[in-house]
Image: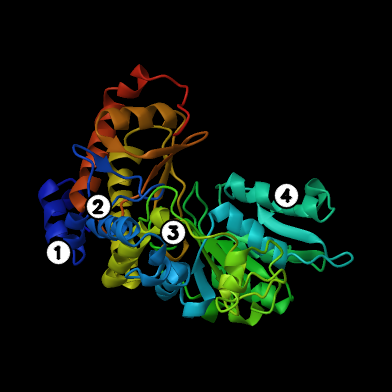
Amino acid sequence: MDRKLLLNPEHAAELDRNNQLAGFRKRFYIPEGKIYMDGNSLGLLSADAEQSLLRVLDEWKHLAIDGWLNGERPWFWFAEQIGAMAAELVGAKPEEVVLTGTTTVNIHALVSSFYEPKGEKNKILADELNFPSDIYALQGQLKLKGFDAAENLILINAQENGLISEDEIIARMQPDVALVFLPSVLYRSGQLLDMEKIAAAGCERNIPVGFDCSHSVGAIPHYFDDWGVDFALWCSYKYLNGGPGCAAFLYVNEKHFSKEPMLAGWFGCDKEKQFDMLNTFIPSQTAGRWQISSSGILGTSPIEGAMRMMLEAGIVNIRRQSLLLTDYLVALLKERILDVFDDFRIITPLQHKSRGGHIALEHPEALRISQALRSRGIVPDFRPPNIIRLAPVALYNTYTEVYEVVEILSEIMQYREYEKFPSKRKAIS
């Protein structure tokens, strides 16, 4: 791409005109006067998601309890049906995915079943850069089974560049490891791990491998069945645009459907037996056996409309556009920021095969720069101690917005506008 064109807003507009997914933007509610670059934390509301929410609200209003069987999408099977829709995004069979719980609850539910220590084979292998909630859950599961979390949770260390080595992960899959649990995309840097390579290595060593895909599903195609992934889970409120607090998803490969859920609950029952009210748990013959409680129908209803739109756009098309937008962002950052101002560094891998949906920009004053960006109508997010994350989302962000973000960032640095802001973060950053 011609370097001069990168500085030209007319060229950004031309790229927008040629964007095959451009029509989806008008179906989202874009915050007025904002350039929203935080879809990797919370996706935007769409008219499609709003419609499915309002429909379910109306069903509750007019059908009351009969909505469980007589709703347009009966509530009793809602979790399984939406899971089947999501299966198309992750390369799974419909019965292998279910909408249930929350991300951390699903970690507990699945790890409690897949972590089966025997003798010296009692370690869990993870990484030090995973989201803290995942680490807390793994520590808790170790303690519940009588192990010292400090000794039995092995955390792969980051390299000097802030990334994780897949080869180092595989090298540590020694006979003492009973489970491997990793993120698909590292939430700070945006590094995309080679899930297929890691899952294959686990299979060769008879070690189950699971992934938290909260920062990848909805932005990147997955092929869990083909890759041999044993289990996975992910939230629905980032790239899937299901709304704050929307339920999460879990995937279990069908070869594990005979496993016993250790955190059993009545919504994991065989649907034909659930209302027999037996004291003996008869689990579903699908991934649904790892459900615990009744579905929060109102809170999860937006994901139906959001999921329909995602499937309409096509995950391969979404990934292609995401890479184009982040390529454009990287090129602009290099020319307008990294080559001009000191102390900036892009820590996201630039190779497509190793890059998630966001770009992580490192700077010692990242917190105050983020606040300055917000004061100028840009919504990024900050991750301590020194990372600004920018996520141009394929379905609603534009090249023009990317151009404007970098232009405003350049002005903030040129005039040192960030110095007006405090160095203490708010409760949520």
- Residue lying at 35% horizontally and 51% vertically, measured from the top left: 43
Nearer-N-terminus badge (4/3)? 4
Q: Disc 3 designates what residue?
A: 355
Q: Is residue 292 left or right of residue 45?
A: right
Q: Position of residue 32 (x, y in %)?
A: 19, 39
Asked if the residues shown at circle 2 and circle 4 are in contact, with their CB atoms under 8 angstroms apart, the answer is: no
Q: Disc 2 designates what residue?
A: 397
User: How is the structure coloured here?
Assistant: rainbow
For the residues labelled 3 and 2, the Cα–Cα distance comes to 18 Å
Q: Quadrant of the image for the C terminus?
A: top left
Q: Residue furthest right?
A: 119
Nearer-N-terminus badge (2/1)? 1
Q: Disc 1 designates what residue?
A: 18
Label 2 secondary element: loop
Nearer-N-terminus badge (1/4)? 1
Q: Where is residue 129 in the image (x, y as percent from the top left)?
A: 60, 48
Does 383 sit above or below residue 73? above
Q: What residue type is labelled 2?
A: Asn
**Which numbered tag is attached to residue 221?**
none
Nearer-N-terminus badge (3/2)? 3
Label 4 secondary element: helix
Q: Nearer the viewer, residue 211 or 101?
A: 101
